[in-house]
Every structure is written in structure tokens, then in C-alpha cells.
Image: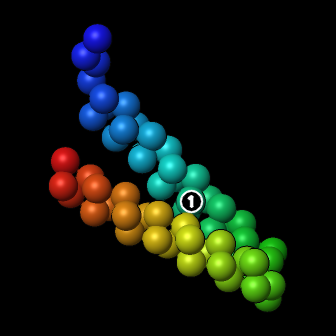
């Protein structure tokens, strides 16, 4: 029943971090003026920081 959950989590975080970077660039280019865009940029920065913290702990 045991499988390498850490590897799966690390892969998911890597994908999430890359996605967050791409999305942040997209929103900076097209939607920076809207409040939603600013909130989303804040969220992706949080995700990237969280991902870095998580990878440092593992």
C-alpha cells in the first residue's frame, strides 16, 4: 500500500510553481489593473514562496 508519496508531492509542487510563474507573467501583461489580477499575482507569489519552503523542508 505504501508508495513514494514524497516524489508525487515534489512533482506536483514543481508543476504548480511553473504554472504559477507562467500565469503571473500572463496576468502582468494583460490584467494588471484589475483587483482580481492583483489578488491572483499575490496568490501565485504565495504559492511559489510556499513551494520553495516546502522543497527546503524535504
Say which quarter of the image contains residue 32: bottom right
Of the pair 3 and 7, the residue shown nearer to us: 3
Spot occupied by residue 21 in the image (x, y as percentages of width and height)? 55, 62
Furthest-left residue in this view: 57
Of the pair 50 and 33, the residue shown nearer to us: 50
Residue named by callout 1? 20
Total marks drawn?
1
Q: Residue at x 73, y 77 (%)?
A: 37
Say which quarter of the image contains residue 12: top left
Spot occupied by residue 27 in the image (x, y as percentages of width and height)? 72, 71
Please give left or right for residue 49 compared with residue 43 in the image.
left
Please tell me whether residue 42 is drawn above or below residue 11 in the rendered image. below
Please tell me whether residue 51 is drawn above or below residue 15 in the rendered image. below
Q: Residue at x 65, y 62 (%)?
A: 23
Q: Residue at x 49, y 44 (%)?
A: 15
Spot occupied by residue 9 in the image (x, y as percentages of width and height)? 36, 38
Q: Residue at x 37, y 58 (%)?
A: 51
Please tell me whether residue 46 is drawn above or below residue 54 in the rendered image. below
Helix or strand or loop: what does disc 1 sit on? helix
Furthest-front residue in this view: 1
Please give left or right for residue 5 compared with residue 13 in the image.
left
Spot occupied by residue 1 in the image (x, y as percentages of width and height)? 29, 11
Amino acid at each position: 500500500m505504501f508508495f513514494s508519496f514524497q516524489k508525487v508531492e515534489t512533482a506536483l509542487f514543481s508543476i504548480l510553481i511553473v504554472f504559477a510563474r507562467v500565469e503571473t507573467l500572463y496576468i502582468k501583461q494583460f490584467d494588471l489593473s484589475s483587483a482580481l489580477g492583483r489578488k491572483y499575482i499575490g496568490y501565485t507569489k504565495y504559492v511559489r514562496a510556499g513551494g520553495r519552503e516546502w522543497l527546503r523542508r524535504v
